[in-house]
């Protein structure tokens, strides 16, 4: 499995790569999932969600992806009637936001490690705790920030 | 001389059979991935490469196979043996989440559950119904089985392939039989850091 493209989170005025997929829990809990199309090996889930934390609450504010047949997916595709903002009340757990330079690249899932992890503990969509986990110090020439080294992109033609 | 001819003849028949059997399997197992790789390949077939793979390689295979066919036969039998074994053992199945009696917490009515599970949001980003955005799933869960089932809350830990999880939710119990469940919480349990001795 290739390293995966992360979700995006806006938190305290900063944009972060988010190595947690709260929508997976939504689908696991009985939320209806459209048939997302896998367009590249770095995006097995078929979509990228944009998230935001406002007043300690986790919201999904955007969804980019393709559906089977080539249609574009949006927030409204999964949450009809909610085109701008969805409160992620179903999600409990830790959100991982890697920070700093890369310590070790792992070409699988969100396996790569970085100098720090900002961890947000969420209970039913509400942030209850924020911690920073120090993982070590990287070399000065190590890449800064989350990245995916390689992927295979499937063109529409190649799928025919 | 006749024994040599017989040996080589048997070898030739076996190698021809193996060659075409292999070709047939190749065609049959032509999966989607192969199709993708082929269609995205930009390199055009080189004439020499085609001659090598379509003519010279088979002739060489038949010639060598006619001599060393006992070895080929052994490999073929071994391959079939391992295939049978693979079918017998198969891949290990991922554990299935099951709720046990010890995981049941409290017997509740639909009304009690729905009253406690209303979700509200100051920005209006959730429908004000039981379980919010998961209301449709909840309705489906209620419609999915017997009319005279009991509803119980539960909490349980389990250990799927991805790592241990803590789960909470509601489960249908019918005449003591634990049926389908509706999840409300699913949290990965952090593993304790490994200690070096």
Image (cartoon, coloured by chain):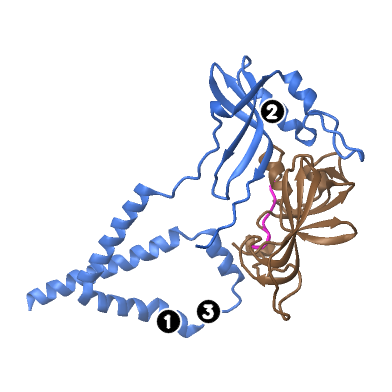
Chain colours: A brown, B blue
Rendering quarter of residue B55:
bottom left
Disc 3 secondary structure class: loop
Give the labeled residue for mark 3.
Answer: B45
At x 39%, y 61%, the residue is B24
Mark 3–mark 1 CB contact (< 8 Å): no
The residue beneath circle 2 is B140
At a point 52% along the width and 39% down the height, the residue shown is B96
Subunit ID for the residue under disc 1: B
Q: CA distance from mark 3 to mark 1?
A: 10 Å
Label 2: element kind? helix
Rendering coords of residue B123 (x, y %): 92, 41
Q: Position of residue B129 (x, y in %)?
A: 82, 28
Q: As rendered, which of B174 and B49 lies closer to the eye?
A: B174
Q: Which residue is mark 1?
A: B51
Q: Which residue: 61% across, 22% down?
A: B145
Which of these two is toward me, A134 or B127? A134
Query: How far is disc 2 from disc 1 in space, using C-alphas?
Result: 62 Å
Q: Find the residue positioned furthest to the bottom.
A: B48
Q: Are marks 3 and 2 in contact (CB under 8 Å)?
A: no
Determine if the magenta segment contains residue A37.
Answer: yes
Percent of width and height locating residue B85: 32, 52
Q: Which residues are magenta?
A: A35-43
């Amino acid at each position: 499995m290739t390293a995966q493209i992360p979700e995006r989170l806006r938190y305290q005025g900063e944009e972060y790569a988010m190595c947690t997929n709260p929508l997976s829990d939504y689908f696991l809990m009985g939320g209806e999932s459209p048939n997302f199309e896998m367009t590249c090996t770095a995006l097995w889930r078929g979509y990228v969600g944009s998230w935001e934390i406002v007043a300690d609450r986790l919201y999904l504010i955007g969804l980019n992806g393709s559906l089977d047949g080539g249609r574009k997916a949006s927030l409204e595709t999964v949450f009809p009637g909610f085109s701008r903002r969805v409160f992620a009340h179903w999600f409990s757990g830790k959100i991982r936001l890697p920070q700093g330079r890369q310590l070790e690249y792992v070409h699988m899932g969100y396996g790569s490690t970085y100098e720090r992890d900002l961890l947000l503990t969420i209970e039913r969509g509400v942030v209850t705790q924020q911690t920073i986990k120090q993982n070590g110090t990287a070399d000065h020439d190590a890449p800064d920030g989350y990245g995916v080294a390689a992927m295979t992109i499937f063109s529409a033609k190649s799928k025919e | 001389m006749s024994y040599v001819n017989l040996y080589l003849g048997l070898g030739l028949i076996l190698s021809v059979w193996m060659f075409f059997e292999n070709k047939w399997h190749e065609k049959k197992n032509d999966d989607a991935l192969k199709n993708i790789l082929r269609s995205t390949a930009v390199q055009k077939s080189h004439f020499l490469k085609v001659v090598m793979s379509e003519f010279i390689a088979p002739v060489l295979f038949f010639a060598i196979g006619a001599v060393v066919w006992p070895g080929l036969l052994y490999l073929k039998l071994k391959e079939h043996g391992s295939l049978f074994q693979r079918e017998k053992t198969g891949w290990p199945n991922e554990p299935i989440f099951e709720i046990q009696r010890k995981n049941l917490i409290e017997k509740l009515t639909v009304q009690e559950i729905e009253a406690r599970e209303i979700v509200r949001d100051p920005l209006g980003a959730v429908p004000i119904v039981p379980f919010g955005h998961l209301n449709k799933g909840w309705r489906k869960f209620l419609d999915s089985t017997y009319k005279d089932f009991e509803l119980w809350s539960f909490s349980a830990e389990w250990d799927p392939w991805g790592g241990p999880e803590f789960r909470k939710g509601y489960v249908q119990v019918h005449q003591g039989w634990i049926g389908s469940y509706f999840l409300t919480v699913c949290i990965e349990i952090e593993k304790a850091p490994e200690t070096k001795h």
